Amino acid sequence: MRSPSHATIAAWIAIPIGRPVIGLLAEYDALPDCGPKSGEWGHGCGHNLLGTAAAVGGIVAAEALEATDTAGSVVVWGCPAEEICAGAPVAVRQAKKAVDLGMNVDLNTGMEIENEAYNVNLATEDRQEGIRAFNEKRKPRWQGR
């Protein structure tokens, strides 16, 4: 087996190392009460298949760059639980901020950025509302604070 190219490595470690950057979104979340039995987590929406397809697509794209000696990077971004947090305005802002700030930094700095964003969400009323809504099996009523 030959050693992986820079493009192949970028597909696995998600750090762009050349331009252009080819990005793929890998949704792989599981949803509550969507499994084979009532009350189980599962993939009723097929996101597990989207995640697999994106991962394979990233490998193929990286191999194509290598085979044609073309500069560039391939990045596969994971996307867990977007349905669960999609409506909470503070959480969405913090997630976008973490992605923007963490895109081109080392892993430790990226984890620090993610932790800061998470800590902001811990103190919000929306977080408490999300927990209450989940426990009461209802849609949350976000306030944006």
Image: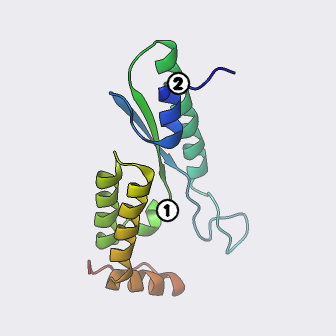
Badges 2 and 1: C-beta atoms under 8 Å apart?
no
Q: Position of residue 4 (x, y in %)?
A: 58, 26
The amino acid on which the numbered mark 2 sits, given as a three-letter code, is Ser
Q: Quadrant of residue 93?
A: bottom left
Q: Earlier in the sequence, mark 2 or mark 1?
A: 2
The one of 52 and 15 positioned closer to us in this rendering: 15
Residue sitting at 56 percent across and 39 percent down? Answer: 55
Q: Quadrant of the N terminus?
A: top right
Which residue lies under the disc numbered 1?
81
Residue sitting at 53 percent across and 29 percent down? Answer: 8
Circle 2: element type: loop
Q: Is residue 98 left or right of residue 37?
A: left
The amino acid on which the numbered mark 1 sits, given as a three-letter code, is Ala
Q: Quadrant of the C terminus?
A: bottom left
Circle 1: element type: loop
Q: Is residue 142 left or right of residue 42?
A: left
Is there any visible trace of residue 46 in the rendered image? no
Which residue lies under the disc numbered 2?
5
- Between the C-alphas of marks 2 and 1, the distance is 31 Å
